[in-house]
Structure formats: C-alpha cells, structure tokens
Image (cartoon, helix red, strand yellow):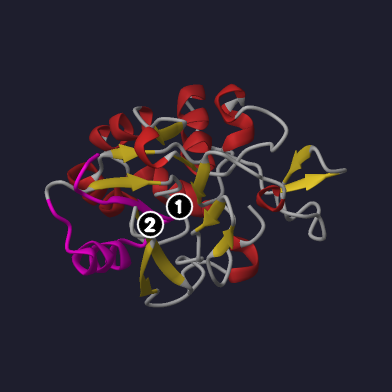
Amino acid sequence: MTKGRFIAIGDVHGCVDELAALIEKLEIKPEDQIIYLGDLVNRGPDSHGVISIARKTATVAIMGNHEQRLLKYRKKGSNSTLSSNEQKTFEQLTPKDWKFIEQMIPTYYVPEIDTVFVHGGFLPQRAWQDQPLSIITNIQVLVEGKKPAKRRDYPEAPYWADFWEGPPFVVYGHTPRDEIYKKPQSIGIDTSCAGGGKLTAYCLPGKEIVQVPSAREYYPRNGSKTR
C-alpha cells in the first residue's frame, strides 16, 4: 500500500487563489496523489490559472459537467450558446488547457482503500462501473427512488448518497453545500468555494479534511446550487 495520501480536491470553479492556498496548506509530499474531482472551470475569476496549477499537481483529474459542457461547445465549433460566465472561460483557455481537459477521466478507483472518486455520484441500484458519464457527472438527487435528477428541478428529493450502501466508498463533488456531506459510504466535498464558501480537500486513508475559505462570493450562491 502506498505510503502517501490520496488527496481529493472538490470543485475549484476558477478560484485560483484559494486553490494555491489549499495546495500550500496541504504540504504535499512526492508520494501523495492529488485527485481533482472535476469542475475546475467556470464561475470563479481564473479557470486558466486553476488548470495551470492542476497540470503541475494532478495525479488524476476527473471529468466534471462543466468541462463536459465546454468540450461540447468547442466540438461544435461555436460558443455562441454559452453563458457570459462560460464565454469568459472559453476565452481564457489555451491549447494546453484544452488538452488537459480532454484527458480527464470518468472515475478513479483505488483498490487498497476500496474507494472510488467521481464528480457527481452514482445510481445506487447499479454497479458503479457500468454507469454512463451523463449520469455520474450530473446526478444529485433521486426521483421516485431511482431516477437521477438535478437538485434545482427537485429541491425536496433525497440525495443519491442517502441510498448508497457501498462498497466502494465514494468521494465526490458537484453538489455544493455549506458543509461536507458525510454518509457511511460516501462523502461530498463541494463546499461552494465560488459561492463564497470554502475549498475542501479530503485526505485518505487518514480521513483528514483540509479547507481554506473563499476570498469572496464570485458567483451567486443560489445560482451555484442549481447547476
């Protein structure tokens, strides 16, 4: 078993200063593995700066729904349907940034700690390995106990993690909350940095939580809870 830590970092969303502060606070050693949980881009001020740090520090980068959306529009050869915030990101990104985004992976499983890292989550009634990217990058809540949905569409619906019994243990982001969301077989670590919350890292196997506060609200908190 590796002597280093597996360090998952929640949704950065362009918050470059906070990411730099978190990396410093983590005191990363050569044997550590840094796992970015996706949504490095959009909302915050400097998506390019975030990806520049990620390129230097990432062992693994997981695909998020925001990266997916940018790739989709880039593939079409037009960014005219992006929001104004996404347009700013589109203009910031360099060829090296796009290459990094294109190489992001759906999940990362670590057998020695029986843990899988993913952006959004999983449908509880299906094997995690068999679920498509469209579900695992977007799922937040379950409707009628089994249908994946977004929280903005069904604000009273229960979270998928409320039904996940494992194994494996799941570390995920995507759903912004004021605090981490800990269940017996999962932990959600998107603590809404771009919305004025915190940027969170979760370190295994020691189960250590490391956080830095956001400098300010870059993106409306209500908006950050809906996508």
How crowded is the residue under tag 1: few (<14 C-alpha within 10 Å), some, or many (20+)? many
How crowded is the residue under tag 2: few (<14 C-alpha within 10 Å), some, or many (20+)? many
Amino acid beneath label 2 = Gly
Q: Residue at x 49, y 59 (%)?
A: 189
Q: CA distance from mark 1 to mark 2?
A: 6 Å
Looking at the picture, tell me which residue is in the foreground, 172 or 55: 172
Looking at the picture, tell me which residue is in the foreground, 109 or 24: 109
Judging by the rendered image, the residue that carries numbered circle 2 is 14
Q: Residue at x 63, y 63 (%)?
A: 223
Q: Is residue 208 left or right of residue 1?
A: right
Mark 1 and mark 2 in contact? Answer it, CB < 8 Å. Answer: yes
The image's mark for residue 42 is 1
Amino acid beneath label 1 = Asn
Is 102 within the magenta? no
Q: Quadrant of the N terminus?
A: top left
In the picture shown, does residue 83 fall above or below 195? above
Can you give x and y, in whole percent of width and height, for residue 53 in the image?
A: 22, 51
- Decide if residue 150 is in sight here: yes
Can you give x and y, in whole percent of width and height, for residue 194 in the image?
A: 46, 65
Point out the stretch of residues depicted in magenta.
1-29
